[in-house]
Image: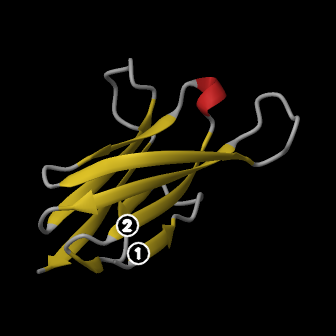
Amino acid sequence: MASVHIKVDHHLVRGKLTPVTIKKGDTLFVEVREHSSTGYLWNPTADHISLTNNTYQNLEEGAVGSGTVRIMEFTAAKSDELTLEYRRPWETMRANKLLTLQVNVEQ
């Protein structure tokens, strides 16, 4: 099995990321910045793409309230569009940032 890594530019606010193609059973890693101490998190949604793991790394060791890098690990059963919303999960208003990524799965 192989893997594909995507590092999302933290200045992006809205838009479509460059589509990726993976093979069924491959792992897709998406790296984003977030400030979880303020409640803002990246919320991924898709019908046929599953979030299987999260890893977090501090941007500044020991700095209270500093941002983190979140590495989301996904597997996909079939082609789908992955939507990433940057918002506080308890708020119903429009997301601060909204990105989409077309994931094409080869059999």
Q: Residue 93: percent from the left, percent from the top? A: 34, 26
Residue 96 left/right relative to 26: right
Q: Residue, x 11% and y 80% (percent of image)?
A: 107
Q: Residue 33: percent from the left, percent from the top? A: 60, 50
Placement of the N terminus among the 4 image quadrants: bottom left
Which residue in the structure is indicated by mark 1? 3
The tag on residue 76 is none
Question: First in sequence: mark 2 or mark 1?
Answer: 1
Q: How many residues crowd around disc 1 within 10 Å: few (fewer than 14), some, or many (20 or more)?
A: some
Cα–Cα span, label 2 and label 1: 6 Å
Q: Give the vertical position of 18 relative to 101 (above or below).
A: below
Q: Nearer the viewer, residue 53 or 88?
A: 53
Q: Give the vertical position of 75 relative to 90 (above or below).
A: below
Which residue in the structure is indicated by mark 2? 28
Outermost residue, top side: 90
Outermost residue, right side: 62
Tell me which amino acid carries mark 1: Ser
- Dot 1 falls on a residue whose secondary structure is strand
Q: Residue, x 48% and y 45% (percent of image)?
A: 54
Q: Residue, x 13% and y 49% (percent of image)?
A: 47
